[in-house]
Image (spheres, rainbow, N blue to C red):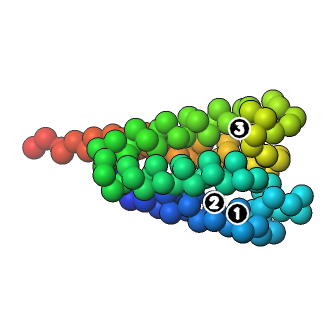
């Protein structure tokens, strides 16, 4: 289960990075974009996507852990985004829509990582 989740989120993050680099009304550098990104933000999405894909392909036993870590990181980024008025760490452009999306992503990815990490125990007869 963790492998599939990592693959899906990895693909989504890579696609989001590409869309952010191209620039669309939904994801992009302009103020008109719903989710405001810049090159640094797009690179972060690309790196996270590639990490999730690599874990799914080469370290399946660590996929649930990777999901948990990324979930916690996204929750921390959300808190930081709400607390800071400028770019995160002076590099990463975000807006309020990004902050709320980071909250949702953090909760969902962390929850899926925890659920995927639980060992299925066969019922005893």
Which residue is more in the foreground, 51 or 91?
91
> In terms of sequence position, does the residue under pointer 3 or pointer 2 come before the other?
2
Label 3 neighbourhood size at 10 Å, few (<14), some (14-19), many (20+)?
many
Give x and y (percent) for residue 94: 79, 46
Spatial CA span between label 3 and label 2: 18 Å
Above or below 100: residue 86? above
Q: Residue at x 76, y 53 (%)?
A: 38
What residue does disc 1 label?
21
Contact? badges 3 and 2 (CB < 8 Å)? no
Q: What count of labels does the image hold?
A: 3
Mark 1 → mark 2, Cα distance in angstroms: 6 Å
Residue drawn at x 18%, y 45% as measured from the top left: 122
**Quarter of the image holding residue 13?**
bottom right
Around disc 2, counting alpha carbons within 10 Å, would you say few (fewer than 14), some (14 to 19), or many (20 or more)? many
Q: What residue would you read off at disc 2?
A: 17
SS at mark 1 in the image: helix
Q: Secondary structure at mark 2?
A: helix
Secondary-structure class at tag 3: helix
For the C terminus, the quadrant is top left
- Please, is residue 29 above or below residue 22 in the view? above
The residue located at (58%, 36%) in the rendering is: 73
Labels 1 and 2 touching (C-beta < 8 A): yes
Q: Nearer the viewer, residue 88 or 124?
A: 88
Question: Toward the viewer: 99 or 87?
Answer: 87
Across and down, in percent, residue 51 comes to: 46, 49
Q: Is residue 6 visible?
A: no
Q: Earlier in the sequence, mark 3 or mark 1?
A: 1
Q: Tell me if label 3 and label 1 are in contact, CB under 8 Å.
A: no
| Res. 15 visible in picture | yes
Residue on which disc 3 sits: 78
């Amino acid at each position: 289960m963790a492998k599939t989740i990592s693959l899906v989120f990895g693909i989504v993050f890579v696609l989001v990075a590409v869309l952010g680099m191209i620039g669309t009304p939904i994801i992009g550098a302009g103020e008109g974009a719903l989710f405001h990104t810049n090159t640094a933000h797009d690179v972060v999405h690309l790196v996270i996507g590639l990490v999730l894909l690599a874990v799914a392909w080469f370290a399946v036993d660590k996929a649930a852990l990777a999901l948990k870590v990324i979930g916690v990181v996204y929750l921390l980024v959300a808190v930081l985004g709400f607390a800071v008025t400028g770019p995160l760490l002076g590099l990463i452009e975000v807006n309020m829509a990004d902050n709320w999306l980071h909250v949702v992503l953090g909760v969902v990815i962390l929850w899926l990582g925890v659920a995927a990490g639980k060992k299925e125990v066969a019922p005893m007869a």
